């Protein structure tokens, strides 16, 4: 029986994957052909979704993007045995998009049935947890530290240091919390892992629980991800049935359970203390620090709060050793980074590469430049609160410290590409407006500053005393950056300041137009 892989990933579903599944089933039945359809995750080549893969003796052959109307011609072309067709891309792993990739975190994503624990184990799953059991909690934390893994949620804090801090904190209870409230524009890596390889997250959380001495974990998921919730709950049930979650995991003395919690759509709950407040059933507002969550987090107990990607990488680090992961990357940015390339770009998708590629290589070589065919003018890196980088900075290497040097941040690894038709004064306004809408309201610089920022940019765009208002806007950004309680208000100035710095002409044009009238 031929295996056909059709993604269950939200991006594929949005492009008609469910209709393609129905069409394939109907066509196969009409021809009396027995097939097995496996709803896998996405390979990350989003411009090809829905991407159908067929298992053949020569390997998995891909076809995409497939519409329901293409199915008949695929069968006519003998696609079940890898036959030639205009939508054919050949062996999926040999596609040029994979040429520069080094898949570690995403090595199984799009390859396996995401809700089959047996298939996960057959592809190397749970080797990391088994090794953790062999070497013990302290050595497990030491391996994570030796790998150089840093938080992939944006802060870039060393994961090993966080785990050790929680493990060393005296307490009768400790928690493992995963931040899956992926709300940045142009980011979808967390979603893809939880849809395509959820057991890597479950195993990573279990390794963390063993290392710090925890018996309870929570995954805080954004409400806009219903397919993720469905798949992850199926995976939790499968993990318990397979004995890799619950009591006496894999015959050990470790008992650990995971609960999925759904947020209500607040962007600020991506900030770890707001997330903890929400998990406790309270309004999601930022806590003052100290104490840090590592000392007094969920319900006042020491808590590890990690991003999905950070936690899902732990199994591979334990399985292969911290040194192998540390060998990838550059300087203090070790390992790989799953880049999410979106916006006005030819090849939008996810690409996992070692740290160190230049922005030019990412946008033009991997992303293929703009979809419109016009010149690239700017790339926003790090979500809606990230800086806008001009082409003159495209030699900047993807590295935490390198981005700090150019007054930018890596964030969650999302890149949004803009061509030369973009109005950067409008994009600066969008950044401030986003902050004003999403602010929890606890601190004055963020709550009031963002609203005044929108008003000030509107005055500049209208040509109203532009020079003085630009200076006022710069002063306001400085106050928000250093006076806000959390990163929402603290980072909101990045898109505004970078737009002012690199694209000043877009803030002068309205004034000139007003003068001409």
Image (cartoon, rainbow, N blue to C red):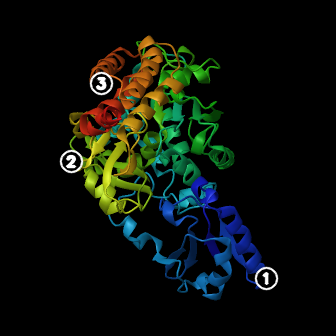
Residue that numbered label 3 is attached to:
470
Query: SS for tag 3?
Result: helix
Q: Visible in this render: residue 357?
A: no
Q: Nearer the viewer, residue 300 or 469?
A: 469
For the point 58% across and 51% down, the residue is 195
Residue at image position (65%, 62%) is: 16
- Tell me where residue 9 sits by quadrant: bottom right
Q: How many marks?
A: 3
Q: Quadrant of residue 349?
A: bottom left
Query: How far apart in space, not on screen, are marks 3 and 1 (Cα)?
Result: 67 Å
Q: Earlier in the sequence, mark 3 or mark 1?
A: 1
> Tag 2, which secondary structure?
helix
The answer to whether the residues at label 2 and label 3 have Cβ atoms under 8 Å apart is: no
Dot 3 and dot 1 residues touching (CB under 8 Å): no
CA distance separating discs 2 and 3? 23 Å
Q: Is residue 64 above or below residue 328?
A: below
The residue indicated by pointer 1 is 30
Q: Earlier in the sequence, mark 2 or mark 3?
A: 2
Query: What is the crowding at mark 2: few (fewer than 14 residues within 10 Å), some, or many (at least 20)?
Result: few
Can the viewer see residue 145? yes
The mark closer to the camera, 2 or 1, is 2
Image height of 338 relative to 32, above or below: above
The residue indicated by pointer 2 is 392
């Amino acid at each position: 029986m031929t295996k056909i892989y059709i993604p269950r990933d939200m991006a594929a579903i949005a492009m008609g994957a469910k209709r393609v599944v129905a069409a394939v089933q109907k066509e196969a039945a009409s021809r009396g052909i027995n097939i097995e359809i496996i709803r896998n995750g996405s390979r990350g080549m989003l411009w090809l979704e829905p991407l159908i893969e067929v298992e053949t003796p020569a390997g998995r052959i891909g076809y995409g993007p497939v519409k329901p109307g293409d199915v008949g011609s695929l069968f006519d072309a003998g696609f079940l045995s890898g036959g030639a067709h205009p939508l054919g891309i050949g062996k999926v792993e040999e596609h040029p998009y994979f040429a520069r990739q080094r898949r570690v975190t995403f090595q199984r994503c799009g390859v396996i049935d995401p809700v089959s624990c047996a298939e996960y184990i057959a592809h190397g799953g749970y080797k990391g947890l088994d090794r953790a059991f062999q070497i013990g909690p302290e050595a497990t934390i030491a391996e994570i530290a030796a790998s150089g893994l840093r938080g992939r949620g944006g802060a870039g804090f060393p994961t090993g240091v966080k785990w050790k801090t929680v493990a060393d904190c005296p307490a009768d209870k400790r928690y493992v919390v995963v931040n899956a409230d992926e709300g940045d524009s142009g980011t979808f890596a967390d979603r893809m892992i939880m849809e395509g390889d959820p057991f890597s997250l479950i195993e990573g959380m279990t390794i963390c629980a063993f290392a710090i001495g925890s018996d309870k974990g929570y995954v805080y998921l954004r409400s806009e991800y219903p397919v993720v919730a469905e798949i992850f709950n199926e995976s939790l049930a499968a993990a318990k049935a397979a004995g890799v979650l619950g009591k006496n995991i894999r015959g050990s003395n470790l008992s650990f359970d995971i609960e999925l919690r759904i947020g209500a759509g607040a962007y600020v709950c991506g900030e770890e203390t707001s997330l903890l407040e929400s998990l406790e059933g309270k309004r999601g507002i930022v806590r003052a620090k100290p104490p840090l969550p590592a000392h007094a987090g969920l319900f006042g107990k020491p808590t590890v709060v990690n991003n999905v990607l950070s936690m899902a990488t732990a199994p591979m680090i334990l399985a292969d050793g911290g040194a192998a992961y540390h060998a990838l990357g550059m300087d203090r940015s070790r390992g790989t980074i799953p880049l999410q390339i979106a916006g006005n770009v030819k090849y939008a998708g996810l690409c996992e590469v070692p740290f160190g590629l230049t922005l030019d290589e990412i946008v033009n070589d991997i992303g293929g430049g703009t979809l419109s065919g016009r010149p690239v003018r700017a790339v926003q890196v790090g979500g809606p609160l990230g800086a806008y980088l001009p082409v003159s900075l495209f030699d900047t290497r993807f590295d935490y410290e390198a981005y700090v040097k150019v007054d930018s941040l890596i964030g969650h690894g999302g890149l949004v590409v803009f061509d030369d038709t973009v109005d950067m004064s409008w994009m600066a306004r969008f950044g401030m407006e986003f902050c004003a809408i999403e602010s929890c309201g606890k601190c004055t610089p963020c709550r009031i500053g963002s609203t005044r920022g929108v008003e000030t940019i509107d005055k500049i765009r209208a040509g109203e005393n532009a020079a003085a208002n630009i200076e006022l806007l710069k002063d306001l950004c400085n106050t928000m950056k250093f006076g806000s309680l959390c990163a929402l208000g603290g980072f909101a100035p990045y898109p505004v300041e970078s737009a002012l710095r690199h694209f000043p002409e877009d803030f002068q044009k309205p004034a000139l137009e007003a003068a001409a009238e």
